[in-house]
Image (tube, coloured by chain):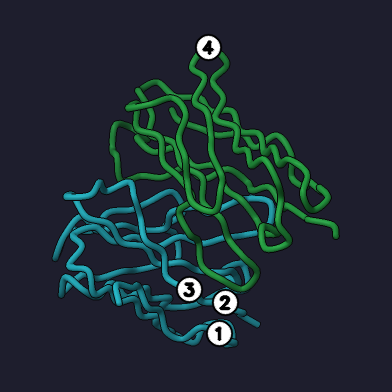
């Protein structure tokens, strides 16, 4: 089954404790992206990657890092999480073949930073 | 710069009555426009996509949207609401800065369906 998976689905952590949220897709998509969703703000793009080893900042990149060492994986790293990073996070992927703007979303990761 | 405005944060309808979720867009480019749906505790699912081929776009689950350039609108409609339509709906534009991979989301409309 074609899908985007994220782990963990739920995470509660404390300020300053480094964490990684994994994202994996099995559709051989070139493009991957991370969003955060906050009430009343919709989804905002954090980082995106056009292909392996190619990443760029989205609209709200502060406090986050990403890497794209393999085509299928695009982890989101919070080196020193803070309470304002408490949010619902979505990973998405798309392909040039079907249109990079038609994105397939993972199930989301709900992060709470205390 | 691209932007979308969803005119209602909450919409409540009775089961079997029509649904109208309103979206206006602003774009310097010829936009691609989307509607996504998010059911409670679920990810986002693509409902439909407009890419200038036809102004009336049909999506899944009986939804459709009409692109009106003169009104810069892309409203989502459904003739008859089901209880299962209760969810949050996002209007989305792409092409921000000319990059088709950048999506700009509206703030969402929460649809409630009353029995």
Residue A111 is situated, as x and y percent measured from the top left of the image, at: 56, 78
Give the residue at mark 3: A107
Q: Residue at x 62, y 59 (%)?
A: A38
Q: What color is chain A drawn in?
A: cyan
Sequence order check, earlier mark of 1 and 3: 1
Q: Which mark is residue A89?
A: none
Q: CA distance from mark 1 to mark 2?
A: 5 Å
Sequence order check, earlier mark of 1 and 2: 1
Q: What color is chain B drawn in?
A: green
Q: Is disc 1 surrounded by few (<14), some (14 to 19) or many (20+) residues within 10 Å?
A: few
Q: Is disc 3 surrounded by few (<14), some (14 to 19) or many (20+) residues within 10 Å?
A: many
Q: Is residue B54 above or below residue A12?
A: above
Badge 4 and badge 2 in a common chain: no
Q: CA distance from mark 1 to mark 3?
A: 11 Å
Q: Are marks 1 and 2 in contact (CB under 8 Å)?
A: yes
Q: Is residue B38 above or below residue A112?
A: above
Q: In terms of image quadrants, where is residue B113? A: bottom right
């Amino acid at each position: 089954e074609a899908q985007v998976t994220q782990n963990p689905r739920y995470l509660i952590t404390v300020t300053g404790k480094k964490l990684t949220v994994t994202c994996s897709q099995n559709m051989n998509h070139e493009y991957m992206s991370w969003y955060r969703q906050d009430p009343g703000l919709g989804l905002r793009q954090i980082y995106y990657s056009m292909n392996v080893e190619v990443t760029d900042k989205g609209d709200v990149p502060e406090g986050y890092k990403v890497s794209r060492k393999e085509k299928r994986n695009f982890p989101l790293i919070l080196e020193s999480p803070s309470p304002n990073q408490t949010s619902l996070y979505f990973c998405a992927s798309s392909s040039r073949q079907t249109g990079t703007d038609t994105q397939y979303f993972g199930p989301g990761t709900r992060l709470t930073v205390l | 710069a691209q932007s979308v405005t969803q005119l209602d944060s909450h919409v409540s309808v009775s089961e079997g009555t029509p649904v109208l979720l309103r979206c206006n867009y602003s774009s310097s480019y010829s936009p691609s426009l989307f509607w996504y749906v998010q059911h409670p505790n679920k990810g986002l699912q693509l409902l439909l996509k407009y890419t200038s081929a036809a102004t009336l776009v049909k999506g899944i689950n009986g939804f459709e949207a009409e692109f009106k350039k003169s009104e810069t609108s892309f409203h989502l409609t459904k003739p008859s609401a089901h209880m299962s339509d209760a969810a949050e709906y996002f209007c989305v534009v792409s092409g921000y800065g000319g990059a088709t991979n950048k999506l700009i989301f509206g703030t969402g409309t929460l649809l409630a369906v009353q029995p």
